[in-house]
Amino acid sequence: MYTTHLAYVHLRVRHLEASVTFYTRFLDLQVAERFGQTALLVSSQNQAPFELALSQGEPLGPLALGFAVPNEEEFQAALAFVKLEGVPFHLEDRGIGHVLLLQDPDGNRVELFLDRRPAGGRAFWRGQSRSLG
């Protein structure tokens, strides 16, 4: 057997510029490359050529994208920024982690995930979630 990890996600979006703005502003991704109606984005901590490809066109349906934050301070900073900008959000406790849920301009779920297992969180998610105030 071999191991894998998520290398990239490719989304079709209705408005490329609105989506590029969302992902660069709220998730600190940078545009790595642009061509035609496509933008390739990467996080500052990754050496990959890209992690997220956005192509203008009719979306194929809502998806969920998960982005990890390294610690509680970063999670709280993301929450404070989203609140400051007036972006709708929802907070969940999934036992293994806390999740800040957003929607991009095309209705795709964007989840900022704080792994709480090292700080006493449950070892497994098992699909259980509860709302955090």
Image: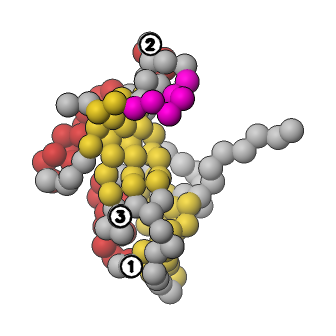
Q: Nearer the viewer, mark 3 or mark 2?
A: 3
Count of labels in the image: 3
Upstream in the sequence, badge 2 or badge 1? 1
**Pointer 3: what residue?**
107
Confirm whether residue 40 shows in the render: no
Q: Is residue 127 magenta?
A: yes
91 or 86: nearer the viewer: 91
Q: Earlier in the sequence, mark 1 or mark 3?
A: 1
Q: How many C-alpha atoms fall within 10 Å of the one at disc 3: few (<14), some, or many (≥20)?
A: some
Image quadrant of residue 80?
top left
Give, as a three-letter code, the residue at label 3: Gly
Judge from the rendering whether residue 85 lies leftward or rightward of residue 40; answer left or right: left
| On-image quarter of the C terminus | top left
Asked whether, in this view, residue 38 is left or right of residue 7, the answer is: left
Q: Which residues are magenta?
A: 124-129
Q: Residues within 10 Å of mark 2 (few under 14, many from 20)?
A: few
Specify which label sits upstream in the sequence, 3 or 2.
Answer: 3
Tell me where residue 130 appears, x and y as whole percent: 34, 30
Residue 100 makes an appearance in the image? yes
Q: Identify the disc placed on residue 120.
A: 2
Q: Identify the residue shown where x is 55% and y is 24%.
A: 124
Q: Which residue is mark 1?
A: 14
